Image (cartoon, grey):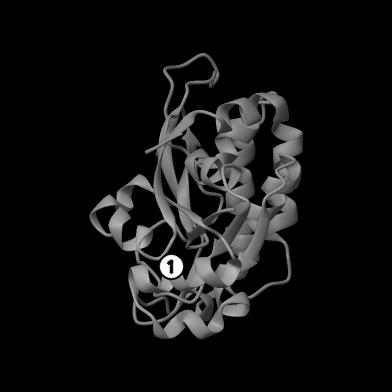
Amino acid sequence: MKIAIMQPYLFPYIGYFQLINTVDTFIFYDDVNFIKRGWINRNQILVDNYAAMFTLPLKKASQNKLINEIETAIDKKWLSQFFKTIEQNYKNAPYFDQTFQILNSVLKKDVSKISTLAMESVMEISQYLQLDTQFEISSIDYPTTICFSQAERLIAICKENGSDHYINPSGGKELYKKDTFNTEGITLSFIENELVPYTQFGNSFIKGLSIIDVLMFNSVQKINLLLSNYKLT
């Protein structure tokens, strides 16, 4: 059984979904510290054919708080401006209607925490893409592991879940060592994402944008092909 554990990100890039697609269980790591200027509440989309950041407003965000403690500060003005930006820049995209419906469904949910909203964005898109990965939440499903640190906690979660193969983004190579996991009977692999170009209004391809951009320009079938472009090391 393969497992991955990641902080909940709002409309993350396609590499996040490649990780989801390669495991049996994906666990949202919501009871770790919030990361300012990270990807929890922001990402990039096309604006005038250039990559531009959008940021969902938060209340008193701090790296001294856990992700699941931080509330959103969404109001009608922000929502109106965000949807206006989306429409102005993507209205001619081939899958605009389907994607806009997803955005509307997620962002208008009656939730107060950024962790919940980010998880909803990931799960709703995963359902749209017909991914069969099971989702769990660290604070709910593995609360007793919070006393452990870094690799020890990941190993503890794997054991509780019954998984023997943990997959981490490649950026974790400096943090986690395969021998540490192997001694506990767990295989550690790193996912190397390949961001294959797709058509964006016929301009030069800008990679690594939010999944919003991928959804706008590609069918479900094409996106599932894009999700398969990775390797495990």
State the image coordinates of residue 163 (x, y, percent, origin top left): 56, 60
Residue 154: image quadrant is bottom left
With respect to residue 32, does 77 lie above or below? above
Q: Is residue 205 above or below residue 227?
A: above
Residue for point 57% across, 63% down: 27
Rendered residue at 55%/64% (across/down): 28
Task: Identify which residue, 199 or 182, lies in the foreground.
Answer: 182
Whether residue 36 is visible here, answered yes or no, is: yes
Q: Nearer the viewer, residue 8 or 107?
A: 8
Q: Where is residue 121 drawn, in percent x and y?
A: 64, 55
**Residue 66 screen position, x and y as percent:** 44, 79
175 sits left or right of 169 in the view: left
- Callout 1 crowding tier (Cα within 10 Å): few <14, some 14–19, many ≥20: many
Question: In the shown orientation, is residue 136 left or right of residue 203?
Answer: right
Furthest residue toward top = 202
Q: Secondary structure at mark 1?
A: helix
Image coordinates for residue 204, horizontal then vertical, percent: 42, 17
In this view of the protein, can residue 73 be seen by the observer?
Answer: no
Q: In the image, what residue occupies the spot 76% across and 35% down?
A: 97
The image shows residue 100, relative to residue 67, as above or below, that is: above
Location of mark 1 (residue): 154
Position of 58 with respect to 118 (left or right) is left
Q: In which image quadrant can residue 119 be found?
A: bottom right
Q: Nearer the viewer, residue 126 or 81?
A: 126
**Which residue type carries mark 1?**
Leu
What number of labels is visible? 1
Q: Residue furthest left?
A: 174
Q: Which quarter of the image is occupied by the C terminus? A: top left
